[in-house]
Image: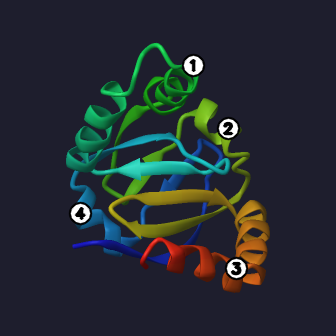
């Protein structure tokens, strides 16, 4: 089943966040969390992570942009477990990267979950919504 929807959850003082109930079954007992793009975090199932990791390690080692992107994604990755209360502990370095404070927005993007600081998400979403016509036109050029 795909990850879909947008949910708001709080982080406790230890950096734990409840995973939306609808996502828990797909994630099983654990998942992989890493730095995402646009200063959010990506949360993957083990299977989806393996697919992405194989693509990343196949990128050309001689290209600086490839090395940088691989480092961003792979070096920042961490296995996380879902506890009995349905929470994951987000490591400090990832909370700092995403500037996560008290409230997080958890979004389902089909094959991955993104975790955003609430204020950052609102700003990103507003900017994207205001440019939706232009974005749709560009996607139309790609056949979507």
Residue situated in front as seen by the camera: 121 or 95:
121
Mark 4 and mark 2 lie on one chain; the one further toward the N terminus is: 4
Mark 4 or 3: the one toward you: 3
* Circle 2 SS class: helix
Mark 2 and mark 1 lie on one chain; the one further toward the N terminus is: 1
Residue situated in front as seen by the camera: 134 or 115:
134
Q: Find disc 2 in the rendering and name its residue.
A: 97
Above or below residue 116? Residue 14 is above
Q: Few, some or many C-alpha atoms within 10 Å of disc 1 (few <14, some 14-19, many ≥20)?
A: few
Q: Find disc 3 in the rendering and name its residue.
A: 134
Q: Residue at x 43, y 42 (%)?
A: 33
- Residue 41 spot, x, y in % from top left: 55, 48
Above or below residue 121? Residue 7 is below
Mark 1 and mark 3 lie on one chain; the one further toward the N terminus is: 1
User: Residue farthest to the bottom?
Assistant: 133
Q: Few, some or many C-alpha atoms within 10 Å of disc 4 (few <14, some 14-19, many ≥20)?
A: some
Q: Find disc 4 in the rendering and name its residue.
A: 26
The reply to whether discs 1 and 4 touch (Cβ–Cβ < 8 Å) is: no
Q: Find disc 1 in the rendering and name its residue.
A: 64
> CA separation, marks 3 and 2?
29 Å
> CA separation, marks 4 and 2?
25 Å
Q: Residue at x 61, y 81 (%)?
A: 137
User: Residue farthest to the front?
Assistant: 141
Residue 28: quadrant of the picture: bottom left
> CA separation, marks 1 and 3?
31 Å
């Amino acid at each position: 089943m795909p990850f879909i929807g947008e949910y708001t959850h709080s982080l406790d003082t230890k950096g734990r966040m409840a995973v939306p109930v609808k996502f828990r079954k797909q994630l099983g007992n654990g998942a992989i969390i890493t730095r995402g793009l646009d200063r959010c975090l990506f949360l993957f199932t083990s299977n989806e992570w393996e697919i992405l990791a194989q693509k990343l390690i196949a990128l050309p080692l001689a290209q600086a942009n490839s090395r940088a992107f691989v480092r961003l994604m792979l070096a920042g990755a961490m296995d996380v477990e879902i506890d009995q209360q349905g929470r994951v502990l987000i490591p400090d370095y990832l909370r700092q990267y995403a500037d996560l404070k008290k409230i997080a927005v958890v979004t389902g993007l089909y094959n991955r979950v993104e975790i955003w600081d609430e204020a950052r998400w609102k700003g990103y979403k507003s900017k994207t919504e205001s440019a939706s016509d232009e974005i749709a036109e560009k996607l139309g050029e790609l056949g979507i």
